[in-house]
Image (cartoon, grey):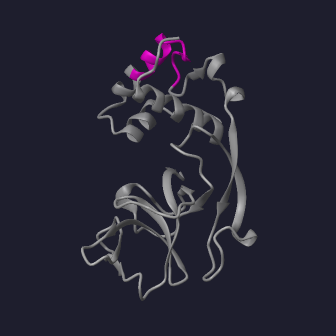
Amino acid sequence: MKELTQRQEQILELIKSNLELKGFPPTRADIAKTFGFKSPNAAEQHLRALEKKGVISILSGASRGIVLNESHSLKNIKNNEIPIIGLVAAGQPMLALEHVEKKLNIPETMFRDNADYLLRVKGDSMIDLGIHEDDLIAVKKEKECKAGQVIVARVNDEVTVKTFSKNKEGKIILKAANSKYSDITLDPKNEDFFLEGVCLGVIKSF
């Protein structure tokens, strides 16, 4: 099999994750929307390239007619069972048993790193980054984060999802991705701030 380009690898992983999580492959429109293509025709071209490389087969006459070939079938994908965390009560640990809604099997290769948990999003403060109410964000527990990363933080016992940065005075700025919300500015010397983890990606809710 010929080596895949980075974009082809990404589309293949999208197909695998859709099959695993939903039971059916994405449409051309789904692929175009996910990767920002101007039309489904661009998605079709990538799918045809994957077919030529022997990774998938395309069934004619079906919008979801994408079949993984044997070497890439789901039985060969190693999965991780990841807990889905719902509403977190103030002052309680993120992974407390009472916060776990259920566990979800997701492919190891779905995100750039292994997620420790999936957090169900509440509210609309990050919609401009494509993170909506009831979406699941994949979170990896980290002790440090970098400017520009989307993080899960505990601020004065309340859990929030925001983009992390710092100003010249060393204060932490938690930025929303919605013009309706103001930035949260924190002085770590005087206010409680704890990094719960870094966002690896999003599983959309439809």
Q: Residue at x 63, y 57 (%)?
A: 117
Q: Horizontal and vertical percent for residue 185?
A: 34, 80
| Residue 49 is one of the magenta-drawn residues | yes
* In the image, residue 148 above or below residue 174: above
Of all residues, the one furthest to the bottom in this rendering is: 190
| Residue 4 is one of the magenta-drawn residues | no
**Residue 15 horizontal side relative to residue 173, left or right:** right
Along the viewing direction, whichever of 64 and 118 lies nearer the viewer: 118
Q: Quadrant of residue 145?
A: bottom left
* In the image, residue 90 above or below residue 29: below
**Residue 115 horizontal side relative to residue 168, left or right:** right
Q: How many marks?
A: 0
Q: Horizontal and vertical percent for residue 42?
A: 34, 26
Q: Residue at x 32, y 32 (%)?
A: 39
Q: Residue at x 41, y 28 (%)?
A: 6
- Asked if residue 25 shows in the view, the reply is no
Question: What's the magenta region?
Answer: 46-62
**Residue 82 horizontal side relative to residue 129, left or right:** right
Of all residues, the one furthest to the left in this rendering is: 168
Q: Quadrant of residue 118?
A: bottom right
- Asked if residue 142 shows in the view, the reply is yes
Q: Quadrant of residue 33?
A: top left
Q: Horizontal and vertical percent for residue 49?
A: 42, 16
* In the image, residue 197 above or below residue 201: below
Of all residues, the one furthest to the right in this rendering is: 97
Q: Horizontal and vertical percent for residue 59?
A: 55, 16
**Residue 22 horizontal side relative to residue 185, left or right:** right
Q: Residue at x 34, y 64 (%)?
A: 177
